[in-house]
Amino acid sequence: MSLNYTGMRYIRDSAMRERCAERLLLMRERLATLRNRKSDSKLLLATWNIRDFDDNKFKWGPRLPETFYYLAEMMSCFDLIAVQEVNRDLKPLQKLVRILGREWDYIVTDVTEGWSGNAERLAFVYNTEKVWFRKMAGEVVLPKGQLIVTKKLAETEDGQKIMEEVDNQFARTPYTVAFQSGWFKFNLCTVHIYYGSASGAKLQRRIDEIARLMKFFRRRQDKENRYVRHRPEKAENYILLGDFNVVSPEHETMEALESNGFHVPDEIGGNVVRLDHGKYYDQIALRVEDERFKVLGGGVVNMFEDVFRDTEDDRTLWEPLIPEDMEPDEPLKKRYDKWRTFQMSDHSPLWIEIDTEYTRHYLDKFASPDA
């Protein structure tokens, strides 16, 4: 079904309303090829970190009324989207889902408290006509013995400074949900891995978070599938996706991601789909035992081809809406480039296309004279 554009009439600024309609028409034309891949026999699965959605704690916003339509237009190309950096207030997410239409729904975590949790939620937004919830959802809590060990500076009773080891859970608790699309049953875990810094102990914590997560799910999957080795169609399959803060395909962060039997599909691996060898933070990793499973394609969507473009015209168009007190001494181009990431995001949507039509495989078992 089409998106619910009717709320556009409540955009009071007539120039914004007109611009929104014009830009949506451009987006729809450009995204038509991707949207046309949607069918009953395939699942278009995506992950998208929508930057600071949407409490304006960094003071570069808030998002404009028109922006919600641009976000929804992009998300409507997919059937199921893992969304990171959803904030405490759920009204913006609910507004986004209303624009997507009545066949769309969402599942969301509680807020991760603590300074490293950044008061964020993780969410799944999905089309209920293509995907259904298998009534299982939970946050990943590591058992004792599998915790992430870090070091911090401490002081002894006599005032000496020492480094002591501390056991940690994930900075932002991963969220796993059981879904089904077509014949394909799968467990989907979305993450926003700790970033820390580019080197040292904080980078090591990032690597350890990824490695612990992959090991956790390898153990769980192996245990669940212990008695279905000869019935792969009965196996539990795992897909982990989200913002892993991977540095590059050659980095230890990627090595940790592709450990314990998980792998990134060739269709989105390395620089195959990265725009100008762009950031590798967002990834989709698979550990699927169903022999019928097949990835048909994948890609990255350029958010700024039709809206908030890197052109002089668009900078001039939106300049009056950039907060004047945010980095006022910087050139307009630099301020605009930063501001627009708080409208759309500083991450691009990453997606894969999965074959979910296994009818032939099932019927062949009965049609064969050797069945």
Image (cartoon, rainbow, N blue to C red):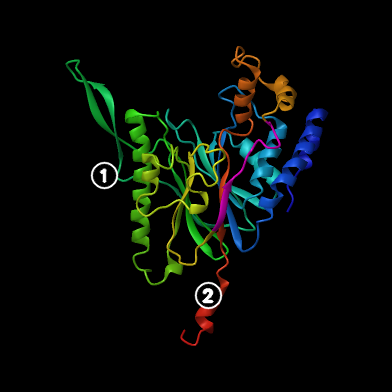
Name the spot of residue 244 as percent of width and height, x first.
45, 40
Name the secondary structure under disc 1.
loop
Looking at this view, is 121 or 63 the one in front? 63
- Magenta highlight on residue 299: yes
Name the spot of residue 89 as percent of width and height, x first.
58, 33
- Magenta highlight on residue 319: no
* Vertical comparison of 50 with 262: above or below: above
Range covered by the magenta-colored residues: 296-309
Count neighbours of disc 1 (C-alpha within 10 A) and say few if under 14, some if 14 to 19, many if 20 or more.
few
Count neighbours of disc 2 (C-alpha within 10 A) and say few if under 14, some if 14 to 19, many if 20 or more.
few
Residue 43, picture quadrant: bottom right
Q: CA distance from mark 1 to mark 2?
A: 42 Å
Name the spot of residue 114 as percent of width and height, x first.
42, 30
Looking at this view, is 260 or 218 the one in front? 260
Mark 1 vs mark 2: which is more N-terminal?
Answer: 1
Quadrant where the image shows the N terminus: bottom right
Disc 1, disc 2: CB below 8 Å?
no
